[in-house]
Image (cartoon, rainbow, N blue to C red):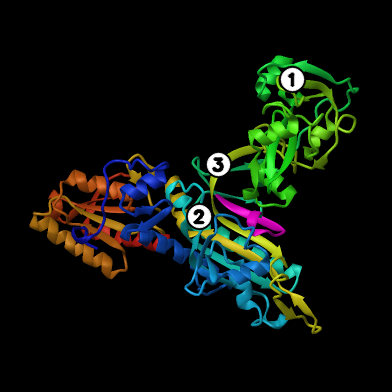
Amino acid sequence: MKMSKFYMPTLKENPVEAEVESHKLLLRAGMIRRSASGIYSYLPLGYRVVRKIEEIVRRGMDDCGSQEILMSAIQPKEIWEDSGRWDVYGPEMFKLYDRNNRQFCLGPTAEEYFTTLVKGEIRSYKQLPLTIYQIQTKYRDEKRPRFGINRAREFLMKDAYSFDADQESSDESYMVQWRAYEAIFDKLGLEYKIVQGDSGAMGGDKSHEFIALSEVGEGEIAYCDSCDYAATDEKAEVIFTPVDADEEMEEMKVVHTPDATTIMALADFMGVSRKKTCKAIDLEVSGEPVLVFIPGDRELNMTKIANYLEVPEHEIEMATDETIRRITGAEPGFTGPVGLKEKVRIIVDKRIAESKNLVVGANKTDHHISGVNFGRDFTGEIAEDLVLAKQGDKCPKCGSKLKFARGIEVGNIFQFGTKYSKPLNATFLDENGVEKHFMMGSYGIGITRSVTAIIEQNHDERGIIWPLVVAPYHAIITVINSKDEEQNSLSEEIYKQLRSKGIEVLLDDRRDRAGVKFADRDLIGIPLRITVGKKAGERVVEFSTRREGENSEITADEAIEKVIEMVNEAL
């Protein structure tokens, strides 16, 4: 492609709305443009990258025996009602009506759709196992779209679904996809970790996430270098010892604690460790007040409490000041489990139940109570683990210290069992002629999200550094002086020869200054570069790679062979 005719509206400055490097560079390189909040158009360079990733994912799926289909992004309300998710999926679902007042949604995911597709078509165990997939646009009305196409309201995703006759076969399908994902992300050149994940709104019995490591990733993972344990912060199990579990119980004592509305201020005032305090989280769950108590030095894990309550996270809100005053009789900041004005649901992390002589809110403004003990002074539901993992925590598998890193979720695999096949009554006949529900799994890869992950791991101060396998073009030929006939002639010759060998190549024949051309080629990140300049009459050019940036003078023929060899080796 000749750049004098190419649509590539690059920008010199970072757009004000861009927060992370991938977002800045995609906009500056003329690869995407914002249409509305969380909605983007893909311009020629950007769309070529998307298609490259699509093809790598498609080959990976086909190689492991999955079969590609394509379903509509518009899904009827009825199938979501049958699964029980229409009213509980949450405000992220785009809902719409047709002219006959029939209700639909723009698919945020496709478990129901795939299950109803197979229902009635696959009737015998002899037709199993089956894994089908699609690469399709998904829609989620994100509360706060951010990080460009990484957290968008419209995104391209590969989703696959497996249908098996029994648990053993379902486990095999799960591992087939696991290995396929490893091959795909290895091919993309991503540095990633595989971690235990939370099933969330998807539901199911087992899940893992493929996390591309990045400092700007929204998610945090906990992992252990001494063993193979790794989990998202939502899922990571927290192991630590209760406080003073062997102490004798003290008498409760009400203490005047003016302005001690935070755990830090309370611990300082009382002269105790934050571990000795009890943190209250005042919640409203589906409109009903719920009080959660955790150790004072920890943070509540909203995913864990949502799973314990068996409600989606969007149904959990922080209680209003008015609600807190009503149930405690005190201003916010002094909630405790002893002496509440109203009977409310109390849930405690197990470490609270096992610790002794804690300091808690007194349900009286500017007052706390010391010497409080679960069982003797208050009761409630005991949850196994409600807190976020943090630095210094022990690995739940081997006891070594956990490490933490941030990352971008680029893939996930879920095992559902019969979560969807039962309510949708999707069955087959086993070898004895007995009707059984399919065992199912779901497997997603974020195509457009992978674009951001690759850029976050491959860029410098000048722009993007694309790996050859996903680069929009393999090579770029830069003509120093487009008015020079010798430079133009040699450039055209190299361009035609590379194209004849199947090399995707850009020819920068624009009548711009050389500095502008160099800046643009650095910005857009084409991996292999040939520069045609003053030695064109001698058939000598400069060759360099975007990553290393070291120029070497070689003949035009050598440059052509080098590009062909490097592309063939990479692909």
Queried whether the magenta region covers residue 414, the answer comes back as: no
Residue located at (62% from left, 64% from top):
442
Mark number, residue 388:
none
Queried whether the magenta region covers residue 205, the answer comes back as: yes
Q: Amino acid at mark 2?
A: Asp
Determine which quarter of the picture holds residue 356.
top right
Q: Nearer the viewer, mark 1 or mark 3?
A: 1
The residue carrying mark 3 is 406
Residue located at (20% from left, 43% from top):
515
Measuring from the top left, give residue 472's x and y in whole percent. Answer: 35, 59
The residue carrying mark 1 is 367
Query: Residue 387, relative to residue 271: is it above or below?
Result: below
Q: Amino acid at mark 3?
A: Arg
The residue carrying mark 2 is 141
Sequence order check, earlier mark of 1 and 3? 1
Work out how far the residue at label 1 is from the one at label 3, CA to CA, in angstroms: 39 Å
Q: Amino acid at mark 1?
A: His
Sequence order check, earlier mark of 3 and 2? 2
Q: Nearer the viewer, mark 3 or mark 2?
A: 2
Of residues 421 and 329, the one drawn nearer to the viewer in this rendering? 329
